[in-house]
Amino acid sequence: MKSTKPGQVCKLQRSLYGLKQASRQWYAQLSTFLVAHGFKQSVTNYSLFTLKRENSFIALLIYVDDIVLSGNDLSVISHITKLLDDTFKMKDLGNLEYFLGFEVARGTSGINICQRKYALDLLTDTDMLNSKPVSTPFDYCTRLHQSFGSLLFDTQISSYRRLIVRLIYLTNTKPDITFAVQHLSQFIASLTIAHYMTLYCILQYIKVAPSLGIFFPSTSEFQLKAFSDSDWAGCIDTRKSITDFSVYLGSSLISWKSKKQATVSRSSFEAEYRALATVTCEIQWLIYLLHDFGIIQKPALVLCDNKSALHIAANLSSMKEPNILRLIVT
């Protein structure tokens, strides 16, 4: 914008796009606008806004300047889209098909989410598109540690770290590589050739089915069910155990994790009990999130194969607290 008189400048009353404070100011402006028009901000996820009007329900999810809008009333969705366009000059891209690397395919039987393009780009950038596929992402008989093999060169180290970051993002739709990726991510500070070769084994496994993702059926019960497990002193370097869990809403997998525990467990039942505590926190967060969508949950099911951990958890659950868990021996 040019001034009509020489030697003058224009003072902007808003943040410039790309500056450090721009994202914060944009979120503050957008959230204020949504709340003023009847939306309620979720305490569980601050990027989620919900709107309830009689028989209509609208959910709006924000990621920086990308917005996903969904609901059961098209007239209300069209009205909100027009308000957003009039205020912020937004562009309606139609039905959700591609969002932040996620490809969404809808059908009468349900919704499928995958990262096919992201996986193919990863294989192309690493020259693994023509590699020989393998059936498993990780050789579970081989236990890697920090001094396993010869050290890598600096150029290989930077390449390894970039691949690990990209694979972590790919685990959002590929839970089958979660354990292998978390196992290799702990060796970033001291990398060897064995770690590097194992990393490329994951890429060979991805090549088998790059379009494989997660399917959410349209007919499923709203019942949370979790599977919890842990090894004991699985890490050779630190002797820490690894927590693994998966949470299902009906028959749909909605949450999973494979992570090393923060402290050393002195026994296997202690490691299993820590895994139960971790999955319980995840379930409690999911229950709060489902409440924002107006879904009232039954007591969640947590399946564990360690009787000692179950007995301790059963004693604690006998206290006068809201019953959010039912423990079942598998």
Image (cartoon, rainbow, N blue to C red):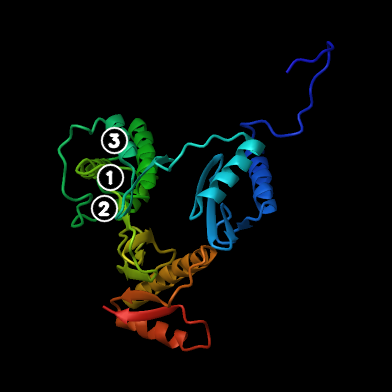
Q: Residue at x 51, y 48 (%)?
A: 69
* Quadrant of the image occupied by residue 196: top left
Which quarter of the rendered picture does the C terminus lie within? bottom left
Residue where numbered disc 1 is placed: 195
Looking at this view, is 262 or 210 the one in front?
210
Residue 16: % across, % down: 67, 31
301 vs 76, left or right, is left
109 vs 277, left or right, is left
Looking at this view, is 37 or 171 the one in front?
37
Distance between mark 1 and mark 3 Cα atoms: 22 Å
Secondary structure category for the residue under label 2: loop
Judge depth for marks 3 and 2 and give the one in front. Answer: 3
Crowd tier of the residue under label 2, counting other residues whose Cα lies within 10 Å: few below 14, some 14–19, many 20 or above: some
Residue 189: % across, % down: 40, 45
Residue where numbered disc 2 is placed: 144
Q: Residue at x 70, y 34 (%)?
A: 15
Looking at this view, is 138 or 254 the one in front?
254
Residue 296: % across, % down: 48, 72
Judge depth for marks 1 and 3 and give the one in front. Answer: 3
Between discs 3 and 2, the one toward the N terminus = 3
Vertical side of 270 occupied by 5: above or below: above
Secondary structure category for the residue under label 1: helix
Q: Residue most toward the front?
A: 75
Vertical side of 179 occupied by 102: above or below: above
What amino acid is at disc 1? Answer: His
Residue where numbered disc 3 is placed: 120
